[in-house]
Amino acid sequence: MNPQRGVASALSSVLFTCLSVGIAALTMWPVYQGERFLVLIGIGLVLGTLVAAAGAAWRWPAAVVVLAGFLVFLAAGVPVAVPERAVSGVLPSLDGILELLGAVALSWRQLLTITLPVGSYQALLVPAFLLVLGGAIVALSVALRSRRPELAAIPSVVILVVGIVFGPATVPWPVPLALALLAVILLWCVRLRSMRRRAAIRLLAPEVQERPRRLEAVADRIAGVRSVVAAGLILALAAGAGIGATTGLPPAGERDVLRTAVEQPFDPRAYPSPLAGLRRYLAVERRDEVMLHVDGLPDGARLRVAALDSYDGVVYSVGSSQEETASGSFVRVPTSVDQSGVDGVEVVLEVEILGYRGVWVPLAGAFEEIGFRGGDAQRLADSFYFNDTGDTAAVIRGLDAGDAYRVRSVVAAPLSDEEVGAARPGGARVPRLGELPDGLALKLDAYVDDAQEPGERLLAAIQGLREEGYISHGIDEEEPQSRSGHAADRITELVTDDLMIGDAEQYAATAALMARQLGFPARVVVGFAPAASGSPIDVLGSDATAWIEVDVAGRGWVAIDPVPPPRPIPEEDDPEPEQVARPQSPVQPPPEDPDPRDEQTPPDTSQQEQQPDDRLLQIVLAVLRVAGIAAGALLVLLSPFLLIVGAKARRRRLRRRAPTPVQRISGGWEEFRDALLDRGYEPPASATRSETARVSQLEQSRTLAAVADRAVFGPGEPDAEDADRVWTAVGGMRADLDRGRSRRQRLVALISLRSLGGYSGRSLFTR
């Protein structure tokens, strides 16, 4: 029976729908964080309420309600969720409708591969609008038309779960939203229970309708207050237990959501290290080639291509292949990145790609916002990904000649030597180092022997590299030759040779490793340091270089250039090799070899004989393990149904073993009546046993009803044999009720909750 009657009840259903769906939708606020999202919630609730109310008023079939909701979604979805495609901001366009329909299937994945918040970027508001509109239609339709209006809470719970799993790993107010939704649902259930109670009392005792309305209103008000207080106590206990559990036993790790588990579409480890390819820009055929045309770059500023923080002893790379790192996770940027915490000057660059090629996007400073230009702008924007940890951006399809973009960023001033000397290590997390080069620790100790403070030691190491190092790119006929690469053996060669000869590739890698050894989080940055000044400028291949960034407490990541200035390389003296007389070692006579035949032992075949048994045992254990896991999973899935079957079995046992024959006979009748309820029969409210027996249409049921009435109301005490005959008859009538039913119908009756609802299960666990 649906207790919803009258205008007041309908208004309360609308209020519940708007509150529950609206509160649940707010869990998606960390995903969007914009005024348009709040407007979307309001419009979705209004439209969903109108569709559901119209369907209830005119009794539309479910298919018509679904069709009406779909048409409303098409009409309002474009201006609400894809506003850029709306005509005059209010009318849907054909392109907008096509994008709207495509977003229904595709935007869910995009939400997981884009940095948050997304605002109203492209069509990513479509999932939120679909959830709010659909949730409002389903919830209000169930509340107004279903026989179980409590089920109207399910859409809100679904929206809450979706908002959690598609949201970020950290959320601002998870507990208040969950408690608010729980409170609304509890009040809704309390109200429905109160309405059912009043309707049942009036149906069972019509004379109560003759009481004065004032007394009836007072009684209803007292019952309502009692129910609200009980619901409040339940809510307080649940909230206290939940908060206490999370406070006393906090979760060991961060919250696991789909965003943290989904495989990102851009993996930087699938591309060669930018540091390993640095020398290709310095070749004779490319050193004078114009790579980029840049307008707006301040004098002395650099263009960063990529930040590399992972070293495995072979190559410096973006992110680590041995562990999950924040620097290796790239996401899409819907609007802009907040860089308000960076102390620097905001610049706007106009960049045109000429000779440069690759997936890495040259930027300046801390990236804030980018906009691509030209005919390929949309494809570039769709494949643009950014990593905020390393301030590194990439375009999956790669940059090519003719591509252009406008980028806004914050360029921080570099640290002076005095500021480096006063610096202290920051708290940034970087991947663990792999194999360290031999001789690096000895060279570092020689540099920092007289320094005490962390900043002074870092400055001493940087100055040592600048003073001892010489520049040679090792290309063409350049002498002396300098081997490329920055693996551990190449760094060892750099720090142990008589002359320290290398280029920015080796010096940046060495400086970063030394800074890590001194306790500073450090990374290598590959990019361009234009020699030209003014604006606009042409960035040449010879401007390619590398430097390091260290995390300094109170300043964040700051750039330090460890590369020595170019200067003549002195010639190494080539002294004549001295003849060193080596002492002759006495030659020991060979040991006497015993006869190998005497040492031979027969082969031990015991292991070979046991191998089949061991292999068979392993197979059996593996099969048992898999079977145990499958059985455990199946048991977990079936546990609710097994609990229902067990509860009914215990109830039947308690009834059959009641202390007196009268109770056993009455329990037998109750067991038969519950069997009727589980099989879908509908006895009238407050029906007598004879009226209930007529519903079953079984002749034996009338006899059973008469026996039960005589045992309960008649004089004398029935015999125990009468109780046994009653239970035998009940078993036979249960079989008669199942006769002609399919296996599925019998299974549904077995796990039905109808006979366990209300007051029928009050004495289920008590004797």
Image (cartoon, rainbow, N blue to C red):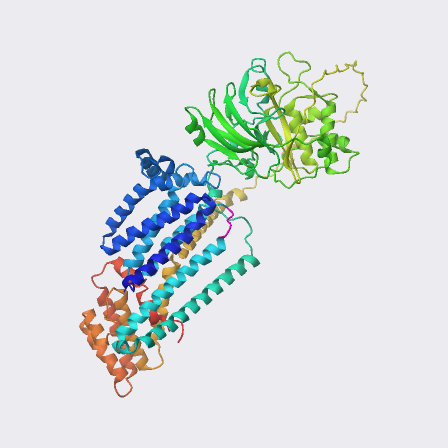
Left or right of 220, for residue 707: left
* Residue 757 coordinates in the image, percent (x, y): 33, 67
In this orientation, does residue 14 appear? yes
Q: Which image quadrant is residue 704 in?
A: bottom left
The quadrant the N terminus occupies is bottom left
On screen, 653 above or below 639? below
Extreme-front residue of the structure: 88
Using the rendered image of the protein, determine whether residue 619 is visible from the camera's viewpoint: no
Q: Nearer the viewer, residue 662 or 4?
A: 4
Q: Is residue 235 left or right of residue 668?
A: right
Considering only vertical position in the picture, is 108 above or below 279?
below
Quarter of the picture holding the C terminus: bottom left
Name the one closer to the observer, 761 or 266: 266
170 part of magenta stretch: yes
On screen, residue 366 above or below 286 = below
Is the magenta region chiefly helix, strand or loop?
A: loop
Residue extending farthest top: 477
Q: Residue at x 38, y 65 (%)?
A: 190
Picture coordinates of residue 612 (x, y %)? 47, 44
Task: Answer left or right for 113 relative to 96.
Answer: right
Range covered by the magenta-colored residues: 169-173
Front-lying residue, 550 or 183: 183
Image coords of residue 661 (percent x, y) = 31, 81
Q: Is residue 100 magenta?
A: no
- Residue 538 x, y percent position in the rendering: 56, 18
